Amino acid sequence: MKINELIEEIGIIPGMNIIVHSSIRQIRKIIPSLIPLELINQLKIKLTIKGSLIMPTFTYCFKKNDTNYEVFDLLNSKSKVGALTEIFRLQNDVIRTSSPTHSFALWGKVVKYFEENNSPKSPLGKGSIMEWLSGLEDSYVLLLGCDFNSLTFGHYLEIINEVPWANISPWDHLGVLPIGVSKNGEQALAQVPGCSKSFNNFKDYLLNQNIITQEKRGDFTFYLIPINTLIKYSTDFFSTQQNMLICPQGSCLPCDERRMKLKTRLD
């Protein structure tokens, strides 16, 4: 299979606004000779500048209790969420937002609405790229070889559905403070996103209800999901099955920390 054939199969059309999560290793299961930059260029060609191509370039530059933490540098801090995202952010026609913890690389229509200085107190909530995508009819999440544990938009769903742990930081055990740190200074944060492994339970719910489909080519899977679909069907799941959105007791330190803090608040 060639890259342009894969993009055709996915169903991308001009004018879509897409946030992409990807695993180059998984894509190479069906395109062994994959050149990441060629994939990026083919996505741009298909979307055209009337659409948007967005990738997370998270660096997680949080202040910590000790002095052992990284300081975000817009130009030089490398993305920690996949090789494709790092290659994408370095392109001359791509801009990167300034959140010390959760920056995004942007191309196309989206750059008319966001500048490099975008760094909301709620990194994945109000004022973020996630909120902008939520207001569009033609916005999508594209998962290439990834599961819902890569679904950044899931954290936005936690916020808008007001899950009880949304504003509880789960990283005290690592000394992480709810403060982003960049060369421009410190920024207090409204939320510190936590574990996303249980987002796969939301995926299973959507698949079982035939709301979304998982496309498979051998061992490679992909999803192209309208964001308004995720919002619509999160309302019930995120309110009535919250126990499915946090890892079982004893299996995940961040989720256990949130559970303990939430219990303390209720007591």
Image: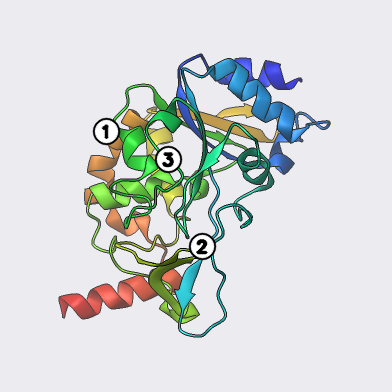
Contact check, label 3 and label 2, Cβ < 8 Å: no
Display colour scheme: rainbow
- Labels 1 and 2: the sequence-earlier one: 2
The image quarter in which residue 267 lies: bottom left
Q: 51 or 250: which is nearer to us?
A: 51
Q: Quadrant of the N terminus?
A: top right
Q: Amino acid at mark 2?
A: Tyr
Single out the residue that lies furthest toward the right.
33
Q: Position of residue 262 (x, y in %)?
A: 25, 73
Residue 232: image tag: 1
Question: Which of label 3 and label 2 is nearer to you?
Answer: 3
Q: Position of residue 77 (x, y in %)?
A: 61, 57
Q: Amino acid at mark 1?
A: Lys
Q: Position of residue 18 (x, y in %)?
A: 48, 29
- Mark 3 Cα shell of 10 Å, populated few (<14), some (14-19), many (≥20): some
Dot 1 falls on a residue whose secondary structure is helix
Residue where numbered disc 3 is placed: 115
Q: Is residue 245 above or below residue 71?
A: above
Residue 249 appears in the figure: no
